[in-house]
Each structure stands twice: as structure tokens, then as C-alpha cells.
Image (tube, coloured by chain):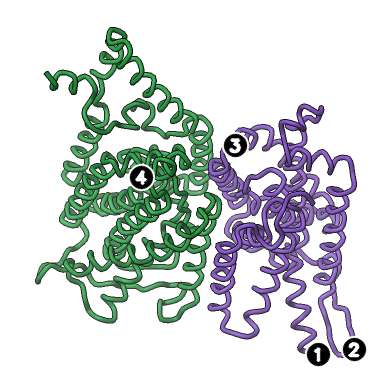
Chain colours: A green, B purple
Amino acid sequence: MSGAREAVARISEDVVTGEGAPAASAPARQASAGWKVLPIVEGLVLLIALVLPWVLQDYLTVFATRVVILALFALSFDLVWGYAGIMSFGQALFFGAAGYGVALMARDLNVTSILLILPAGALIGLTAALLLGGFLLLGRYPSSVIFVSLGTLTGSYAADRLARGWYYLGGQNGIPSIPPLTLGSYEFEEGPVYYYMVLAILVVVYLLCRFLVRSQFGLALAGLRENEQRIAFFGYKAQHLKAIIFAVGGTIAGLAGSLYAFHEGFVWPNMLGVVFSTQVVLYVLFGGSGTLIGAVIGTVIIEGVSFWLSDNYRDVWPIILGVLLLLVIMFRPLGLISFVLGERERVGRFGKAPKEAGNAAP
Amino acid sequence: MASTFAAVFEIVSFGAIIVLVVLGLGIIASMMGIFNFAQGEFVLLGAYVTYLAYAHGAPVWAGMIAAPFVVGAIGFVLEALIIRRFYAAPIVAMLGTYALGLIIRESVRGLIGGFYLTVPEPIGGSIDLGSVHISAWRFTIIVITLLVMGACYLLLARTSFGLRVRATLENPALARASGISTPLIYGATFAFGAALAGLAGALIVPVFSLFADLGIRFLIQGFVAVMVGGVGSFIGPVAGAGLIGTLSAALPWVMSPVVADVLVFVLAIAFIKFRPQGLIAGKGV
């Protein structure tokens, strides 16, 4: 947290020197010449993701598909926590609700068309997030951070308990044997096709999120995270901004949940509950909250290592995970990505750089 | 009549268990301002210490007496090494203690495996009141809960240590300026909260048996109880715990347990939304 504050201070310092003493801004410009770490990292990740199915065996491609879906889920949490500073400890509620929703559509209504399932999943996530977010975030008095985090956690826990006890939703066992997704008469089976379909969705959503967080709306969100009161004094309706981004996060989580349900072929109560909710927190914190690519990288690393270790070290892995997480929180609050990514680039900027503006004027 | 009495006893004894679990959580949340996600694992540790003592041939009550001291000591060390860094940011404290809890829980899971281990009640049998038989151990838990509650209240309200704790809560800078060592007070308070959790774990392990997810079961209920009661005082969380515990034990008698389970949480969150200060507002004891 304090790191982020330093970064803001440093940026404002740059602005001051840029305006007051043009000569002093030369080193700053030098520094900004090596600006673009983020696109390089993003490009690398995309490249690896694209060639992966050719390198991996089939059963590993299925695993990679699951990781890509979870990365989409992590993205939704990152928007809410990393950008707007809303601690949503119950993000799995939207993920699981959409999963259960589309599973019921497939079971009871025989709907498996991708053109209906994905919008329906996103819509379920959006509705649930609007209801829960509206209740927790809006109101006459601004809600405390603690209340929102415990409220979302409780919501997710209660949904888990409800799903476990409700016979219609399959109780403890959930809903098994969901038929595959279809497009016309084509069936999406697990494997490379499903992988590329999910990857394409991830890339599109990623680009939309990237546009969103680099817009003025996104900067207002970052301001909200750093100093909510100041943003409110600027005239932004802080609570509305929070509710909007919470709903966007819920939509993406719903999309991920419906993809996950059809990919795994079944849904079960854990998908709604505390297990998945905290899992996604781990991904994002580990990779680096407040950068979209950090969420993706965190998911890939945690799931990858967990898969790799699961045969021999199944018992020890959760303990190692806990220790790593504790170390990251204590010493690298901005996650692994902060090893390569500077503060300045993480926060980003809005509009043209001052120097370019100066050149363009005459 | 007899069945009503049995039901009331059931409800009260569950309420007492929740109060016992929440006491430590409430003291840490109120006096230090952090929500300790590892509290459930301190309960688990207390239960585990009792089980260890029993497994090595010591009497169960000896394990129960040892548990709060062992867990309190662990809490003190953890506070000095780790928790201390998190005071500035409550959300980071949540995440950090969550990671800590994960480590403790999975370590215990590694030690006991996926089993449900039973520990016998040190005071077995039942108390007969006319035609009604109530479990002697559950009755003992109610009595101990009342005693511990009273002792905590006296400690915080009537002793010089309690005064220092409250001073540190009220205004840390002024407390430091008055010569109170606030880091030591924080350490002691955290250790005390952990010790209470250890005691709770030791007392409830004969009822619920020992398994790795024992703590999680109570954690969320505990947080909700603290928020309902009101953060910042000693009485608030206790009142909230009594209410939540009683409600979640009583509602299944009048409606389907699944609905009751969820309804308690929904009611609690709605209550906190419209009364953020909780049942009992204000700082102090």
C-alpha cells in the first residue's frame, strides 16, 4: 500500500519538475524511454498461450483450458480489488451462481447453445453482483471496507450452505454430467478447440478490461483505491463507481463460471463457496493486484505448480502456498509482477504526455 | 414441557459455545482493530493440544488446562513476528492472518490426516432433572463460559492491565506518551485473545470431535457475531455472539434447517447494513 502511495508522490513530483524546470525533466524522459514492460509481458504470455496446445499432450491441454478459465475469474477479482480497492471475499458467489444457473438450463431446459449459455451466465453474474453489490455498497452511509469484505464472504458462505442443503441443486454432489456446449450441431469437447475458444474469450475480455482501466473511469477507480475521500471531494460519486465496477466484476465472474461448468461437466457447492473465493484472492495477490496481467500470471503459476506438485507433495503444497502467500503479503505487497514492472507503469497515465502536448501545440 | 426444556438447553448450550469462540475474536477485533482470520485455527490448535495430551495418556482435563497457555504462547510469538506488521492496514491484516490460518490448518491436517478424532468428555454422564436428562459436559461448558466472561470483564474493566489495554485502544499516541508500552500491550492482548480461542477449542472438542476444518465452521459465524454486536467494546461482540448463537440454534426448530442456516446470515448482514455501529455502540468495556 505504502508503495503505491510513494508512486503517486513520485508522479506528482515529475509533474512539478516538468512544469517548473524543463531541464530537470531530461532524466525523467530517459526513464520513460524504457516504459513498455507491460506490453512485452502481455505479448509473451499471449504467445506462450497460443503455442501451448501444440506442445502439450491432450490431457494437459484440458488442464490448461481450466487454468485459462480460472484466469478469467481472477481477472474479475482483480478489477474489483486491484483497481477499485473493494475487498470481495465472495467473488465465487457469482462464479458459482452462473455455473449452477447454466447447469440447470442444460439439465432442465436442454439449452446448450453457446450463444445462449454465455450471455445467460454473464447475466446471472451481473444480476447477482448488482443485487449484492447494490445492497452492500450503496446507501445513505458509505460502507466500511471491513463490512463489504465480510458481507461478500458471508454471502458466498451462505450460498454454499444453501446449495449443499437444497435437493433441487443436487445437495453435496452438485449437478453431474452436464452435456457439452454446442454451436449449431457442433459440440465443443474438451481439448484444443475448447482451449482456443476460451483463450479468445479471455483475450477479448482482457482487452476490454485494459481499455476500461486506462480510461478516465479506470483512473477514478485507482483514485478510489488510494484515497476515497479525495475522489469524493472531486465530485465523483464514489459509491456508484464502486457498484459499477463490482457489477462488471460479477459479469466476468459469471462468464467464467458458465465456461467452467461446461468444461468440467459438473458443478458442485465448492464453486460457490469460501474455497474458490479465497483461491482467487491467492491468484491475484500472488501475481500482482492492480495489474491485469498479474492476475493471469498468478493463476498460471499457482495452478501450474499445484498441478506439478500434486502427485508427490499433495499434503505439503497447501502449507507451502500459505508460506509463499504470507511472504508475498509481507515483503512484496504488489505481487510477483512488481519484480519487472515499475510503479509508474502500473499506475499508468491518462491523456497525452506533457512533452508531446508541448510539441503538438506550435 | 420436558421437550421444551431440552430444546432450550440445546439452544443455550450452543449459544454458550459461540460466545466462548467469539470472546477471543471480539477482544482482538475490538481492542486492536484487526479481524483475525487465523482465530478459527487457534480454536483448532486448542482442540489439537487437548487431543495430543489425551493421546499421550494424560487426562483430558490436563490437556484442556494446558491448551490456552500453549495457544496463547503461539499467539504471542506470531504477533511479534508477523501480525505486528499489519496494524496499519486492516485489509492486509485480514489477508495476512488468512495466510497464517491456512498454514496452521494445513499443518494440522498433515498431522492428523483427514480423520475425525474423538476425545472423551472429562465429565461424562448426564444430569437428571426430573424426567429431563441434560449432558453434564454441555452444562459445564455453559458454566465455564459464564465464568470466563465474568473474568474477562473484570480483567478489562477493573485491573490496571485492562486500563492500559483500553487506553491503547482509545488513543495509542497518548498511551505511548503516558509511558505505556503499546507494542507490549498489543502483544499481550493478541496472546490473550488467542488463549481464549485455545480454551474454546479445548472445551468443544469432546462435542464436535477433532478435524482440520473445525475452526472454519466457527470463523464466519464469529465474524458476523462481532459485527452484529458492534466492534469497539467487550460487551458488544459477546452480545452479538449470544444473539447469533441462540438464533442459529433456535431457528431450525421452527423451519427447515437449510433455510434457517442461510436466514441467520441474511438477517445478520441486513442488520449490520442498517445499524453499522452494532447492537451496542461505543468504545470501552
Q: Earlier in the sequence, mark 1 or mark 3?
A: 1
Tell me the subunit letter for badge 1: B
Tell me the subunit letter for badge 2: B
Say what amino acid the circle numbered 3 marks.
Answer: Phe
Query: Can the viewer see residue A162?
Result: yes
Classify the position of the C terminus of chain A by image quarter.
Answer: top left
Is A303 left, or right, of B224 in this rendering? left
Residue pointed to by mark 4: A299
Which residue is drawn at the image coordinates 81% and 55% (left, top)?
B64
Viewer-side label of 1, 3: 3
Q: Are marks 1 and 3 on the same chain?
A: yes
- Spatial CA distance of label 2 from label 4 is 62 Å
Viewer-side label of 4, 3: 3
Say what amino acid the circle numbered 4 marks.
Answer: Thr
Is A173 left, or right, of A209 in this rendering? right
State if disc 3 and disc 4 touch (CB < 8 Å): no
Q: Are marks 4 and 3 on the same chain?
A: no
Residue pointed to by mark 2: B130
Which residue is drawn at the image coordinates 45% and 55% (left, top)?
A277
